[in-house]
Amino acid sequence: MLTKRNSWLRTGTLAVLGLGLAYGAQSFTEKEEVKPISTTKVTATVWRFIGTNSSEILQADKWEQGASSDPNCQNDPFQPLPCQYTVTDQTIADSEELMDYFEATYPSDTADEVRNHADSQKPEIL
């Protein structure tokens, strides 16, 4: 009986020592570094058109940064003027940069395309 107890104790001790050695050896091996996920913040710039007719759409001084509070602004593609335009794919610092953005984004029929892609439109004031 005494030898059965000793062999069980010896086997258990060796198993615990083996697990301890395996765990210790694992902690010394080189592990792949976990890298943080990079996130990109999307910047949106809202511009309001303060002009009164279609010929002013591509004039930088007729655009101001900020949301429009014009009560005539609506989602009506048949209105001839843009009311509010949001740029989401890059930061636009001033109205001159906005004109460059419009010309690069809509190289043909720029004024019409700006109106068609505006967040809202408004009627022309004659």
Image: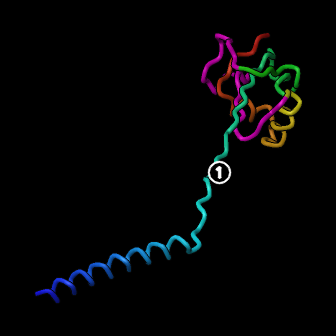
The amino acid type found where label 1 is placed reads Ser
In the image, what residue occupies the spot 70% across and 30% down? 86
From the viewer's perspective, is residue 17 above or below residue 55? Answer: below
Position of residue 63 measured from the top left corner of the image (x, y, whole percent): 81, 22
Instruction: Name the residue furthest left.
Output: 1
Q: Which image quarter holds the C terminus?
A: top right
Q: Secondary structure at mark 1?
A: loop
Tell me where residue 113 sits by quadrant: top right
Left or right, 108 with reference to 89? right
Tell me where residue 124 sits by quadrant: top right
From the viewer's perspective, is residue 121 above or below residue 111? Answer: above
In magenta stretch: residue 5? no
Q: Main secondary structure of the magenta part?
A: loop
Of residue 20 and residue 4, the one placed in the foreground of this image is: 4
| Colouring of the image | rainbow
In magenta stretch: residue 87? yes
From the viewer's perspective, is residue 48 above or below residue 98? Answer: above
Residue range corresponding to the magenta coloring: 67-93
In the image, what residue occupies the spot 83% across and 43% down? 104
Position of residue 66 measured from the top left corner of the image (x, y, whole percent): 73, 20
Q: Which image quarter holds the N terminus?
A: bottom left
Tell me where residue 34 sits by quadrant: bottom right
**Which residue position holds label 1?**
38
From the viewer's perspective, is residue 14 above or below residue 88? Answer: below
